[in-house]
Amino acid sequence: MCYGAEVGKIFVALRDNVIFLFTTVLLIDLGNILEQTGWVARGVIALLLLFSVISWGMILQKIGLFGRIRRESDQFLRIFRATRGVANPQALASAGSPFASVYAAGYRELQSQVGSGTGNPHPPKLKSLSAVTVNMQLASAEEVRRAEKGMSWLATTGSVSPFIGLFGTVLGIIDAFSGLGNAGSGSLRGVGPGISEALLTTAAGLFVAIPAVIFYNQFLQNIRNLAQRLDTFALEVAAQIEKTFN
């Protein structure tokens, strides 16, 4: 056991050293390339950096949002199904859950139809179940729209960033060959820095776009799952109301 622990410590130390060396070399190389870039490339990189910062802020916000929705929704559904009836929304936990909002919308419409008769031994008949269902569907659509906020920015970042990087690449190559023609030198040493500067913007565009596309697809799937679960829950509540009041 002691031997295994020592091997584990050595492995962790080697991993940390490799990561440190890789990061140091990468930063040094990027620093040297950035020192040789022109104002066009720097402007493109600065624009892509702005896209990246906003996108990662949106990504982290969405990760926290969907995690909170998952926890609160599971808790609400567990309590709701254990109640086995049409209970007051205030008696249920996780009021911040989208399922709680959908249920509250249906319960308000139910109360407007039957009044305070929910506590009587023989509750009055329900006037319109479809009205209750429609109110829950409207609340469900509103919750889905709330979850979709910011998705357009991720979609825009994923589709536009590569073209912004390509724009910087084209201008950089044009500038490199223009300088090569003016200098009258045909060596790779003369055109190499300009081409590396141009390709840096393409790499930066892909670096910004790839995470945005990955998380956009993941969040889109989460939103679709949420919409489907909310629709199913609205039908479940409608069936429970119909069984209770009809």
Image (tube, helix red, strand yellow):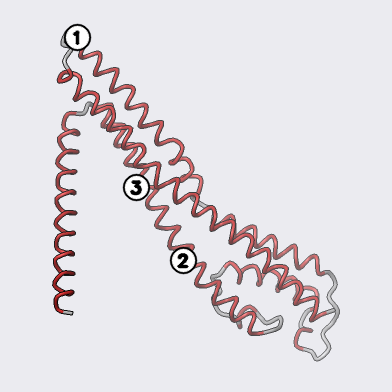
**Residue 182, numbered label:** 1
| Image position of 137 (left or right of 27) | right
Residue under label 2: 67
- Residue 105 image position (x, y, % from top left): 68, 68
Residue at point 46% right, 66% down? 67
- Within 10 angstroms of label 3, few (less than 14), some, or many (20 or more) residues? few
Residue under label 3: 53
Picture layout, residue 125 above or below residue 23: below
Q: Give amino acid for label 2.
A: Gly
Residue at point 38% right, 31% down? 164
Quadrant of the frame with the C terminus:
bottom right
Q: Give amino acid for label 1.
A: Asn
**Is label 2 in a helix, a strand or a loop?**
helix
Q: Give amino acid for label 3.
A: Val
| Image position of 38 (left or right of 202) | left
The quadrant in which residue 43 appears is: top left
